Image: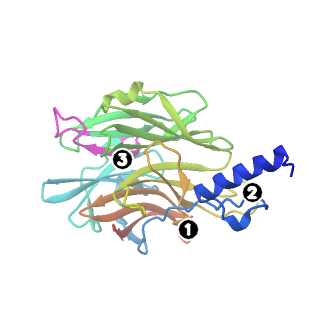
């Protein structure tokens, strides 16, 4: 009996699919069925709880919008958090002993013309007490850019230089500093775009914190729809194979410039690398109802997330905390 080349080719492909688990023998002679990839789950988040709602005079008509936290154990407080306002007026310091209840520093603001501080502790092995900050400058202009600053006491900052230089007509903002526990490398993940129809999430990595200024860029995502505010988190033993997972949280706004608006949402992606191929997690968006800018942390095997919520009743942004068990 004569066998056509097409039939032979199909048999080979079908056999290979069976070996790879993409099809069963019962599907022989029919179109191959490739199962959809299984999406990674995110953490089981608690209900949001409002924090940092006592305004200071310098904040004026702006509100805390982001919160970057490190454990310092100084001046009677275990945790220190640096917050930026929803516009670019400046950044302040708040401190806590339980990561839920925060006391704002009396001498705020620490810096003016500053937004979106992201803080790392122990980034310089030779000087472990130095805190490094990635901060947005000139936020309310079309040439917003990102600088690196440092501080010994967490209160007095000095600017080191540009991490992302100003470019005319190009917003570079929402920086997130991340120290990868596996590779030891430092990552800067940030948003670049025009806030209209061009949005990118970009990653830079280097062996040292100072090396981020000259490190090459890698585009992780590019879209015509609003996506910004990237923050990274590594969770060990997070997937079914007990492997670690990197979660990239972002803010999105489906239909932002359309008639039907969905409002601000938090959308999370996962990958096996801090600058790898990120896929949406199951159950997105993980936060909705005008919520955005999720900063992710793990302290003592418990997750703490700090996000913004736009309250339509007051037309003001407010800070919220979320918690979750980690395995």
* Residue on which disc 1 sits: 283
Looking at the image, which residue is at 36% across and 44% down?
178
Q: For residue 13: magenta?
A: no
Task: Determine whether 215 is above or below 122 in the image.
Answer: above
Measured as percent of width and height from the top left, residue 211 is found at: 34, 27
Which of 248/49 is in front?
248
Image location of residue 304, percent across then percent down: 34, 63
Q: Is residue 123 magenta?
A: yes
Sequence-first tag of 3 and 2: 3
Element at label 2: loop
Circle nearer the N terminus (3, 1): 3
Give the Cα separation between the discs numbered 2 and 1.
Answer: 24 Å
- Relative height, residue 314 to residue 181 (above, below): below
Left or right, 106 with respect to 116, comes to: left
Q: Are marks 3 and 1 in contact (CB under 8 Å)?
A: no
Task: From the image, tell me which residue sits under label 3.
Answer: 91
Q: x and y percent of residue 48 in the render?
A: 43, 72
Label 1 sits on a secondary structure element that is loop
Tell me the CA gap for discs 3 and 1: 33 Å
- Mark carried by residue 258: 2
Residue name at image x 16 percent, y 32 percent: 126
Q: Please indicate whether residue 300 sits to the left or right of residue 50 in the image.
A: left
Q: Residue at x 26, y 35 (%)?
A: 150
| Disc number lying in front (2 or 1) | 1
Looking at the image, which is closer to me, 15 or 121? 15
**Image quadrant in which the C terminus is located:** bottom left
Numbered range of the magenta stretch = 112-131
Q: Residues within 10 Å of mark 1 (few under 14, many from 20)?
A: few
């Amino acid at each position: 009996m004569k066998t056509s080349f097409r039939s032979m080719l199909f048999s080979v492909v079908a056999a290979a699919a069976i070996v790879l688990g993409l099809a069963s023998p019962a599907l022989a002679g029919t179109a191959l069925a490739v199962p959809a990839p299984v999406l990674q789950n995110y953490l089981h988040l608690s209900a949001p709880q409002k924090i940092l709602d006592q305004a200071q005079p310098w904040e004026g008509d702006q509100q805390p919008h982001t919160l970057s936290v490190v454990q310092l154990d100084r001046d009677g407080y275990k945790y220190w958090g640096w917050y930026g306002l929803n516009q670019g007026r400046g950044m302040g310091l708040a401190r806590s002993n339980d990561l839920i209840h925060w006391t704002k520093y009396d001498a705020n603001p620490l810096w003016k013309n500053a937004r979106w501080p992201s803080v790392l502790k122990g980034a310089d092995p030779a000087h472990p007490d130095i805190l490094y900050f990635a901060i947005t400058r000139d936020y309310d202009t079309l040439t917003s850019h990102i600088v690196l600053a440092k501080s010994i006491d967490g209160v007095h900052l000095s600017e080191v230089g540009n991490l992302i230089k100003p470019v005319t007509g190009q917003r570079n903002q929402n920086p997130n500093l991340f120290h990868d526990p596996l590779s030891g490398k430092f990552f800067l993940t940030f948003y670049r775009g025009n806030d209209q129809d061009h949005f990118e999430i970009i990653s830079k990595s280097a062996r040292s914190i100072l090396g981020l200024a000259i490190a090459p860029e890698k585009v992780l995502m590019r879209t015509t729809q609003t996506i910004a505010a990237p923050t990274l988190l590594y969770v060990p033993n997070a997937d079914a194979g007990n492997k670690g997972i990197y979660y990239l949280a972002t803010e999105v706004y489906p239909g932002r410039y359309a008639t039907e608006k969905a409002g601000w949402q938090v959308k999370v992606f996962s990958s096996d690398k801090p600058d790898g191929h990120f896929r949406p997690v199951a159950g997105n968006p993980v936060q909705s109802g005008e919520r955005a800018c999720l900063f992710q942390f793990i302290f003592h095997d418990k997750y703490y997330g700090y996000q913004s919520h736009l309250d339509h009743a007051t037309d003001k942004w407010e800070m919220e905390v979320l918690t979750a068990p980690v395995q």
